Image (spheres, rainbow, N blue to C red):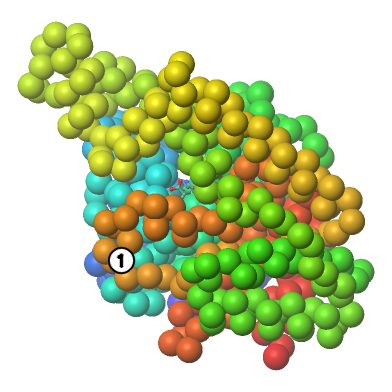
Amino acid sequence: MAELSNKTIKQVQVDLRAETTTCEKLVRDYLLKIEANQHLNAFLEVFSEEALERARQLDKNISEGKNTGKLLGCVIAIKDNICYKQHKVSAGSKILQGFTSLYSATVVERLLAEGAIIIGRTNCDEFAMGSSNENSAYGNVLNAQDNSRVPGGSSGGSAVVVQANLCHASLGSDTGGSIRQPAAFCGLVGLKPTYGRVSRYGLVAYASSFDQIGPFTHTVEDAALIMEVISGKDNYDSTSSSEPIPVYSSTLNFENKARIAVFPSTMNSDGLNTEVKSSVENILNDLKSEGHIVEEVGFELLEFLISTYYVLTTAEASSNLARFDGVHYGYRSKNANEMDPVYKRSRTEGFGKEVKNRIMLGTFVLSSGYYDAYYSRAQKVRRILTDKIRSIFKEYDFIIMPTSPTVAFKFGEKTDNPVEMYLADIYTVLANLTGIPAISLPLAEDKNGLPIGVQLLADKFQESKLLAFSEKLMQIETSK
Ligand code: GLN
């Protein structure tokens, strides 16, 4: 089993077609590992019987020589904010406890159509709001490498299930870093696609103009393959793009010399851990010695990113979360029987503290007296950022910066101070504010062996180039 976890999806498929293993055996092995790792609290639910049944069906197809799909035998978990028909979905919230989805997200349909086996749903921060998975109504997820540390958030469960080899890959969602930051904290590859690359249909909305679904994997090749399957136009999501989908997994060769921009402001910012900083510097030096061009580019907007992100996302969240009212969905307070108290009590009792903070902040920034001062100003900053990024990508192929200012921190370290927690997102929100794709790569470790993620950003719809260069970077760093 240990060997299998080191294989890429394509390598597993070679074994499956050679019949040296079966889907059923893969699932059984993972179920045993899941059983032995329950303390991590990474899965909220495991679809054991169903996964086994599906595996047997796929094995039958293989033995009959049927075309079995690009993700044949890929045992995958989905974050608990992605809908799967007739399965529970709670977005890590008590307000959706017991709620069963009536339809499947487009990503789920696409995974299933290509032979993937969905093994369970993963724990996450409530409504994907958080950077440490400490905001889930269903308890903390433990970082598998050091159980006293957080896995990152909000897709903490999706990161840990791959980190601990409880399944082959997973899907998370990234509104401001929720795939990349936990990937960095758990030593994984985590990709946030271009806004519109992957359908959001069936994703429980947090901030609709920021949210994207993306993969957690051990390898770039697996991320590329999953992207091939989940990307593309969807008539159920009008913001999805009809931009053609390259065969990402077969275009992983990057032969050119890249032009890379580095923002001095990101490298000199307060709070950047010295080991994280020197890891990124080492990688930049390695790239230079391989003949790539690395140049400093002024970026004076760093200090505005967090405030812009939190004004806009909380505004969108306050509107998106209005639907959880004790009437339409999930939890209803037993302490109220008239309309207003039903709304008030159900929301007061059903939502956790951070979600309530954000709904109030979002309502405030949208209120008539403050709209111009906060919401519309933040929109203007978003426009300035988008223009700036566009002009940078006229001259450069990539931007490199840390994924997170620190390695995985300890439980409780930042829970008393929300602003400190928000600052953990300083390097990740830019990609969501501007809609560009970004990937976190597990390229270094600190002196205690904790993973350090390096973030690579590219222009819109340049996933192909982003993945190819990621593969190159992984090769450069592993060959050292
Ligand atoms: N940590 C960020 C937040 O709390 C990002 C969350 C996300 O990407 N879903 O908003």
Task: Describe residue 103's horizontal placement relative to residue 227 as left or right.
Answer: left
Residue 296 higher or lower than 369, as above or below: below
Question: Callout 1, which amino acid?
Answer: Glu
Task: Describe residue 291's horizontal placement relative to residue 282 as left or right.
Answer: right
In which quadrant of the rendered view does residue 277 lie? bottom right
Q: Residues within 10 Å of mark 1 (few under 14, many from 20)?
A: few
Q: Residue at x 70, y 91 (%)?
A: 480
Residue 105 higher or lower than 455, as above or below: above
Q: Position of residue 477 (x, y in %)?
A: 69, 83
Task: Describe residue 248's horizontal placement relative to residue 448 as left or right.
Answer: right
Q: Residue at x 78, y 41 (%)?
A: 387
The extreme right residue here reads: 256
Q: Residue at x 29, y 49 (%)?
A: 136
Closest to the observer: 301 or 148?
Answer: 301
Q: Residue at x 24, y 54 (%)?
A: 139
Q: Which residue is mark 1?
A: 413
Closest to the observer: 436 or 122?
Answer: 436
Queried on whether the Cβ of the residue with tag 1 lies below 8 angstroms from ligand 1, the answer reads no
Q: Is residue 391 visible?
A: yes
